[in-house]
Image (cartoon, rainbow, N blue to C red):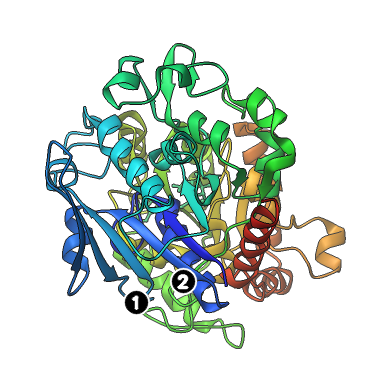
């Protein structure tokens, strides 16, 4: 049994802005289920303190400018042991974990996540105030990127793993934060945590961690060169031997069309009639025409350049003219939000957009749509394309990162072999997207072939157990290197 401290800035169901929360909510539980001792460390945001019961104080830090405590509780649902970094001055704020209510980054994010990283490192070191000592410190994204660095500066302790969920977010701050956070001045170097004159939390993690991983094999390859290396390709290519790519799983209990409380009807591989009723209910909810024959294209996404929403918007008028319906749920960049709203106004009854974050509607779109669009320009792993396969809604994806690794294109050969589960296109352009939607809609016209595609996706096993075993093997390799 390996003892693992899983340090993260968000975890479902307590706090979520994206896929990192789904992973942090599910992977530690899956590791515990296969017999590992994995505990979580999370900042004490409102949602965290309010979402757990009976939190107990474990430790009080006396040497910091503001009150900081460590609490212990259990994760709701999974019961995984949770350490909460309770620091009201830093984490009890209006707005989200990283931004205020107006969408501006909290001005002291370096300090907020510097503290999270520093405490993660302390708990993984021989100086930890707690009796429980992890053998592996598993850090996730830039918010915990300084932890492997602090652990090295403190003379070591647990082995550290830095997992990249998205290289587009690197935690870059002006150089004066090096002194303000008390980092050793000599660490501010190319062979350290300096990044073009600034401090980069993620680079620190990638430089100082004992092992690196990312969330799909394809993305692990892609980030070793431009453009997807986003400035860190040199470091990642040099550390290629230490870099693993492990595809995420999905929470198959929470995303299960047989018993999803968010859906008006249930269904399964044994009978898809409930899915037709989910489509009718979704059309009604979103004020789309009640037309069972119209192919309904769904999308649930952060509205950012990464996700290729603009490509969908470029072809949307034509899609609607050709008889398709569109249902888009998302929030993000103001320009993309406005363009989505305008689309719905131009095509009342044929295109619907909901701007905001809505967990229930996300499930209902996964279930009620016929085809799920995910034309991301890059996608480290992506979860929605796996949810949609499980919900019998073939995904249509750009061939990148985890999308390439988890969707099997409906080529004639794959269709004949019954392995096809969706549609994959190579170039991130509106023309390629348009051509592939056309290809998908042609197959949609062949009811028997379409049903085979749906069933092949629904039968795939995307459960966490497989990924958890790969992480376990990775932890063991890291410990064997000692
Ligand atoms: P990313 O983390 O890059 O946003 P993922 O596909 O890994 O992409 O995960 C996104 C997660 O967030 C999924 O669980 C998805 O259903 C959810 N999600 C994204 N946008 C919304 C939204 N507007 N409402 C509800 N859920 C959303
Ligand atoms: C990031 C990536 C997404 C991935 C998620 C969880 O948000 O953008 O592709 O699925 O992290 O690893």
Q: Residue at x 71, y 60 (%)?
A: 443
Residue 56 image position (x, y, % from top left): 19, 69
Q: Along the horizontal axis of the image, is 342 left or right of 71?
A: right
Nearer to us: label 1 or label 2: 2
| Residue 437 appears in the picture as rendered | no
> How many numbered discs?
2
Residue 360 image position (x, y, % from top left): 32, 66
Name the residue nearer the viewer: 10 or 86: 86
What residue did someone put label 2 on?
29
Q: Residue at x 26, y 66 (%)?
A: 72
SS class, disc 2: helix
Query: Image quadrant of residue 401?
Result: top right
Q: Residue at x 19, y 45 (%)?
A: 91
What residue did someone put label 1 on?
77
203 vs 391: above or below: above
Q: Along the horizontal axis of the image, is 236 left or right of 42?
A: right
Whether the residues at callouts 1 and 2 have beta carbons within 8 Å, the answer is yes
SS class, disc 1: loop
* Disc 1 crowd, CA 10 A, few/some/many (<14, 14-19, 20+): few
2 vs 116: above or below: below
Q: Dividing the image into 4 quarters, which one contains the N terminus?
A: bottom right
Q: Earlier in the sequence, mark 1 or mark 2?
A: 2
Cα separation, mark 1 vs mark 2, equals: 10 Å
Name the residue nearer the viewer: 105 or 420: 105
Q: Is mark 2 within 8 Å of ligand 2?
A: no
Q: Along the horizontal axis of the image, is 138 left or right of 470?
A: left
425 vs 187: above or below: below
Residue 215 image position (x, y, % from top left): 59, 50
* Disc 2 crowd, CA 10 A, few/some/many (<14, 14-19, 20+): many
Query: Image quadrant of residue 146?
Result: top left
| Residue 253 appears in the picture as rendered | yes
């Amino acid at each position: 049994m390996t003892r693992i401290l899983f340090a993260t800035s968000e975890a479902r169901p307590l706090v979520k802005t994206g896929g990192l929360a789904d992973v942090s909510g599910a992977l530690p539980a899956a590791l515990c289920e296969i017999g590992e001792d994995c505990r979580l460390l999370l900042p004490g945001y409102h949602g965290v303190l309010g979402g757990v019961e009976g939190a107990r104080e474990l430790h009080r830090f006396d040497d910091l400018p503001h009150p900081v405590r460590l609490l212990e509780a259990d994760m709701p649902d999974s019961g995984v042991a949770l350490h909460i970094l309770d620091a009201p001055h830093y984490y009890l704020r209006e707005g989200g974990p990283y931004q205020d209510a107006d969408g501006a980054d909290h001005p002291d994010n370096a300090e907020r996540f510097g503290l999270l990283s520093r405490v993660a490192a302390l708990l993984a070191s021989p100086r930890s105030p707690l009796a429980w000592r992890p053998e592996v410190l598993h850090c996730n994204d830039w918010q915990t990127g300084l932890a492997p660095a602090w652990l090295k500066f403190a003379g070591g302790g647990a082995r550290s793993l830095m997992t990249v969920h998205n290289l587009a977010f690197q935690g870059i701050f002006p150089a004066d934060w090096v002194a303000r956070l008390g980092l050793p001045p000599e660490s501010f170097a190319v062979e350290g945590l300096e990044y073009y004159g600034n401090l980069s939390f993620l680079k620190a993690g990638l430089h100082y961690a004992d092992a690196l991983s990312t969330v799909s094999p394809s993305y692990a390859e892609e980030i070793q060169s431009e453009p997807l290396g986003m400035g860190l390709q040199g470091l990642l290519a040099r550390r290629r031997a230490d870099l693993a790519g492990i595809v995420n799983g999905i929470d198959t209990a929470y995303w299960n069309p047989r018993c999803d409380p968010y859906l008006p009807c249930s269904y399964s591989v044994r009978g898809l009639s409930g899915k037709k009723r989910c489509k009718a209910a979704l059309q009604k909810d979103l004020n789309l025409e009640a037309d069972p024959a119209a192919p309904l294209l769904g999308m649930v996404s952060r509205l950012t350049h990464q996700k290729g929403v603009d490509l969908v918007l470029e072809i949307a008028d034509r899609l609607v003219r050709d008889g398709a319906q569109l249902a888009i749920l998302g929030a993000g960049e103001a320009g993309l939000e406005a363009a989505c709203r305008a689309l719905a106004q131009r095509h009342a009854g044929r295109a619907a957009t909901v701007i905001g974050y809505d967990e229930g509607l996300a499930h209902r779109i996964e279930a009620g749509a016929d085809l799920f669009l995910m034309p991301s320009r890059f996608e480290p792993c992506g979860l929605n394309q796996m949810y949609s396969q499980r919900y019998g809604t073939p995904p249509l994806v750009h061939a990148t990162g985890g999308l390439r690794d988890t969707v099997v294109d409906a080529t004639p050969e794959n269709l004949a072999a019954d392995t096809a589960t969706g549609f994959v296109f190579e170039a991130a352009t509106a023309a390629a997207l348009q051509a592939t939607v056309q290809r998908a809609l042609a197959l949609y016209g062949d009811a028997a072939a379409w049903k085979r595609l749906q069933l092949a996706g629904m039968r795939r096993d995307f459960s966490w157990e497989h990924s958890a075993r790969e992480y376990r093997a990775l932890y063991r390799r890291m410990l064997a290197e000692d």
